[in-house]
Image (cartoon, rainbow, N blue to C red):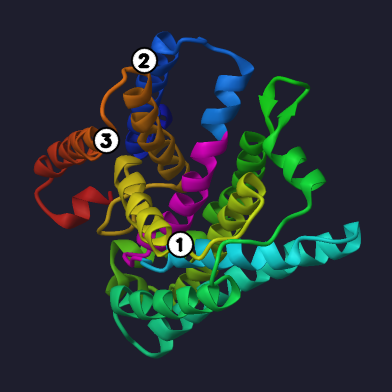
Amino acid sequence: MSDWRFRLADNRSTLLAVAIFVVMFILYISNHPAGLTANVVQTASNKAVLLAFVAMAQALVVITAGIDLSVGMIFVLTNCLASWLVVGTPLEVGFGVLAVLATGAACGAINGAIVIFGRLQPIVTTIATGAIYFGIALALRPFPGGSVDETLADALTGRVFGLVPASLLVLVAVVAMIWIPYSRSVTGRAAYATGSSEAAAYMSGVPIRRAKFVAYTLSGLLAAIGGLFLTFFTYTGDAAYASGNAYTLFSIAAVVLGGVSLFGGRGSAIGAIFGALAFRTIGDLLFVFDFDPLWQPLFQGLVLLFAVSVGAVALFRVRNRLDWFA
């Protein structure tokens, strides 16, 4: 198989997610009363990056054949923490941002340590830790409140040169600084090997424990970046249980829509990002077509079912599981 054909086959699921998003966004823009303007793109970007960060967090864990049901609660916890810490002088704001990101990474590391050394199922572990993280968030913000440095918030949620959404640039920067080095590293390749077949990876000397631990830690870090941006958008912290659950479920949907296999070992965070963008665009489409918001779950479910069905067609062509990862 030639190099370009191999790359095309390897990135087929990501390209499908990109295509779904592009089609939906074109439909959205062509039917929006204001058309394609900087304000419309900025609003859409600011709403989508929140789910994109959480979807990236979920994707890293799913690639290892795990699942993290605490990403939404880490997202909420760091939002509440940021409303306490990201205020004051520039130095205090900087330390506050670092503390929030470190907290998210620590939450992910705790998840990874329990899964690895406690040998518990990821779904059970992250349900339990998610409840603990939400309890801490509720202790920090029993009622919505707090504030955030407005200068930093406006800079990261506004537009660069009056045209490009700053939040979108931050998302690209996070992909460049976290996902690309990680996916090309030994640890990243070990994560894919672990998700494909943990037993085979172990027998081949792959550092399984390190791969899982780094994946969960980075997952917590990415969820914390999403929590920070939620604080920048709302200027407040809110321990909203429904919001945490919604982002957890939506992140799984975005991961599936983005072509990341729930069996592990296949897909990418970039696909999950475009899955998140497409998933968010569904709600925007309902807005421009003036549909009742109660229809939104139906349309989201139909698009998700379509994406899963396309992936299933490819599965029917293989004779055994090893062929799927070839």
What kind of element bears circle 2? helix
Residue occupying the far front of the picture: 143
What kind of element bears circle 1? loop
Asked if the magenta segment contains residue 62, the reply would be: yes
Cα distance in 3D space between marks 1 and 3: 21 Å
Q: Which mark is residue 296?
A: 3
For disc 1, the neighbor class at 10 Å (few under 14, some 14 to 19, many from 20) is some
What kind of element bears circle 3? helix
Q: Image quarter for residue 80?
A: bottom right
- Which residue does the numbered mark 1 point to in the structure image? 240
Cα distance in 3D space between marks 2 and 1: 32 Å
Whichever of labels 2 and 1 marks the residue nearer the N terminus, that label is 2
Amino acid type, callout 2: Leu
> Secondary structure of the magenta portion, mostly?
helix
Magenta residues (range): 46-67
Amino acid type, callout 3: Gln
Q: Are marks 2 and 3 in contact (CB under 8 Å)?
A: no
Q: In the image, is residue 87 above or below residue 203?
A: above
Q: Which mark is residue 27?
A: 2
